[in-house]
Amino acid sequence: MSTAKLTVDLAALAENWRALDAQSGCETGAVVKANGYGLGVEKVSQALAHAGARQFFVATAEEGAKVRQALGPGPGVSVFSGHMEDDTALIRNQDLIPMLNSVDQMLRHMESLPSGRFGIQLDTGMNRLGMEPAEWAALRDIALAQKPVLLMSHLACADEPDHPMNRQQLRSFIELTANNNVPRSLAATGGILLGRDYHFDLTRAGVGLYGGLPFADARPVVSLDLPVIQTRDLAEGETVGYGNTWAAPRPSRIATVAAGYADGLHRALGSGGIAVFSGDTACPVVGRVSMDLITVDITDLPSDPGTLEILGRHQSVDTLADAADTIGYEILTSLGGRYQREYVA
Ligand SMILES: *Cc1c(COP(=O)(O)O)cnc(C)c1O
């Protein structure tokens, strides 16, 4: 078979949730937007619920419906984008909790679902989503009278612990949310690692669950094995791939593996000095990454491998991200639909 195999370690995922949960004295939620960071929202949500997560977060109401279908009634499913036009039926039928971002969303929610649960997202300086301080000042008493279930905001620089923006947003969040009994949430993965001041009542762990930075102690969750389709010998000076970007500096043996940029393995990896692994031996990727194929220098292996590992024990999503000049989040969420996916518990 020439389909690469993506293995998702659900036990490692659960362990990462427990490890992040152990760092706080409050409840630890799970962010499963973008199809569970690309790993499969149904399996990921079920494994996290089994580990003990009771609060789930997604970007859109449609994603929320998928999580509700996977989990059944009970766990909270909150939607960061709030209550958009046309979301009302989904929010009601799937029992979702919109995080309202504006006066418009607030009015829409009050009119269409007057007894429906909601939270409020406040902007503490990121200027992306949430009510501005002035908007909140005008709305605050009316909104609090409707008993929101959560007041939340999001940190812009939490992956840089010494960044002054963290303290500034913390101060702003405390000011905006003082003197009421509504549960509060400020921290995603980075915020959890900043310490207890940032935790409040509920954290929203995302990328760390899936093995990505800034949670450096995370257990790897994904491994990706690429089948070798063909091998060949090259004389010194022969070239490999589009544009002849690599020429053999010595007589070489080249393996062609089945996966490429259409599978989320960015074209930039071809010049990023990345390796793939046969057991513990690193084999350099050479030449350009094609749509469906990657070429690898296996000259130093004692025999031809059946598969080569590009993600796993030896190489994390963040190593690939560095080589492609991006972040682990993007590597995860780009992992393509063509892989054979296997879930191990
Ligand atoms: C994506 C997101 C999270 C999770 O962030 P991670 O850095 O992946 O832990 C939490 N809160 C909000 C508002 C988000 O958009």
Image (cartoon, grey):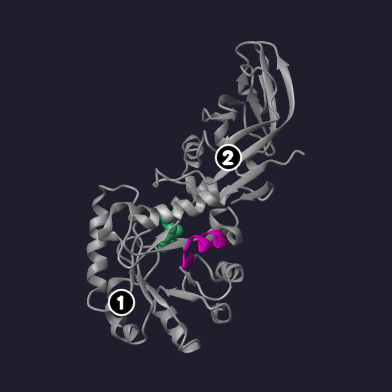
What residue is rendered at 65% in x and 38% in y?
A: 260
Percent x, y for residue 158? 33, 52
Residue under pointer 2: 266
Q: Quadrant of the N terminus?
A: top right
182 sits to left or right of 308: left
Is residue 238 in sight in this rendering? yes
The boundaries of the magenta stretch are: 45-57
Dot 2 beta carbon under 8 Å from ligand 1: no
Give SS at disc 1. helix
Percent x, y for residue 160? 31, 47
What residue is rendered at 46% in x and 75% in y?
A: 98
Residue at the limit of the structure toward the right, as seen here: 1
Percent x, y for residue 10? 56, 52
Q: Check the image and report above or below for 81 versus 252.
A: below
Q: Nearer the viewer, residue 75 or 246?
A: 75
Magenta span has 46? Answer: yes
